[in-house]
Image: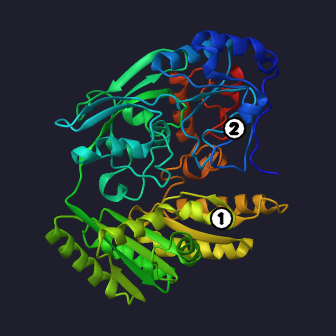
Amino acid sequence: MSTIAMPAPDASILSRKDQIVAALAEAIGAEDVISDPVETRAYECDALTAYRCPPLAVTLPRTTEGVAAVMRVCHQMGVPVVPRGAGTSLAGGALPTADSVILGTARLRDVLEVDYPNRFIRVQTGVTNLSVSAHVDAYGFFYAPDPSSQLACAIAGNIAMNSGGAHCLKYGVTTNNLLGVRMVLADGEIVELGGAQMEAGGLDLLGLICGSEGQLAVVTEATLRILPKPEGARPVMIGYDSAEVAGQCVADIIKSGLLPVAIEYMDRPCIEVVENFAHAGYPICEALLIVEVEGSEAEIEDQLGKITAIAQALDPVEMRVSESLEESAAIWKGRKSAFGAMGQVNDYMCLDGTVPVSALPRTLRGIGDLAAEHGLRVANVFHAGDGNMHPLILYNANTAGDLERAEALGAEILRLCVEMGGCLTGEHGVGIEKRDLMGNQFSESDLEMQMQVKDVFDPNWRLNPTKVFPLPASETRRNRA
């Protein structure tokens, strides 16, 4: 039984299910509304599968206007709404409540506009992350944010959680590549922010929306920055017999002033599982770094020369520069497969606390000590270049008490990240997973200010309820709805 509490559903809403479903069907068409309990079970959780709750109903509108119609019905009938992209959230961001309506973006799949001279693409937010780059690839462009789930995750969820990815070290996360949005407020009003221009005037409301976890509005269309593909790119694999030394190598590379496009980290438990799954040619060692640089061949050679010199000074057990496109693809296939490969051998909880790069060696040592104290194994795979940790806490969901132990260890690791000068989340979001830890990073006045922002956008607190804020802090606001 999880230690994460959820409020009891509103009985008055449950008793009106038939009327609510009928109103939604009238608003957007019965074919885009799911209410059969057998079918709604498909939406009972996201990728944080330890927590489940079937929703009251699911809506899958096909246009911004359809989303607005759903929002108006739910506003008028007092029903909570949980926005959902592809359901790949690792923090319970799309977990429904029993009295809520899921508003899915899966049928918002159109590419609306592409402007290569001005380097932007406008899409509906149900399109997948990888499909954006695929759409512009033939013209020599790509979309930079590349979370590991990019094959499946939707732009809607990327915006909600401000997702990053392996290459965010150089190109930034979603907020650095988002130019504008079209979105629907809690009462059904349609609003546009930003646009094709590089920088919008006035208040940075776009920055407020990106990373707001569906608390403020439902984003239905997005204008995204696209970039010309580099001339070339090449990774180098660097293996060490110590996690702390690998962390020191990362810190030394960043301190030198070099800016690789990516620096990724895997430890031995992860390396062994991934290599068995993907056959990427990884050396079996205590810690593996994948450092990729890009540019012209001369630039690549110069950067790799400096990086390998830094790495060599720390006595690696193995160092290998990719010599072909096929070898580079295999290296990245292994890294992108890491989460799925680990799922073959264990249930796991994936965290995303972030620390300063200089604190990586101490943080890795601290995670190892905490894992030993709790009697659980932890595999580490993460974006080392910007200190975005991804410890995978391995447990057995069928063993009584294991989930609770994993949760307790996860909380200790996230507190450690904050103590090291970092934060609770780098890209997965708060959701329900870190909700009760917000007080470790923010003061009561900080949280009150954040909740006042939600008051403005969602005065009845019906958008993605019970997420982000500790339940006691938001109880009065939720009850007044």
Q: Residues within 10 Å of mark 1 (few under 14, many from 20)?
A: few
Kindly identify the residue that appears in the image at 67 percent across and 35 percent down. 466
Q: Which amino acid does label 2 sit on?
A: Ala
Q: Is residue 301 above or below residue 130?
A: below
Quadrant holding the C terminus:
top right
Mark 1 residue element:
loop
Residue under numbered circle 1: 344
Percent position (x, y) of residue 469? 62, 39
| Horizontal side, residue 248 vs residue 397: left or right | left
Q: What residue type is labelled 1?
A: Gln
Q: In this view, does 97 lie above or below 412?
A: above
Labels 2 & 1 near each other (Cβ < 8 A): no
Numbered label attached to residue 42:
2
Q: Residues within 10 Å of mark 2 (few under 14, many from 20)?
A: few
Residue sticking out furthest to the left: 298
Numbered label attached to residue 256:
none
Q: How many marks?
A: 2
Question: Between disc 2 and disc 1, whose residue precedes?
Answer: 2
Mark 2 residue element:
helix
Kindly identify the residue that appears in the image at 41 percent across and 69 percent down. 330
Kindly identify the residue that appears in the image at 53 percent across and 49 percent down. 428
Q: In this view, does 127 lie above or below 31?
A: below
Q: Quadrant of residue 416?
A: bottom right
Residue 199 visible in the displayed image: yes
| Horizontal side, residue 320 vs residue 7: left or right | left
Percent position (x, y) of residue 4? 74, 47
Kindly identify the residue that appears in the image at 82 percent across and 60 percent down. 398
| Horizontal side, residue 366 vs residue 168: left or right | right
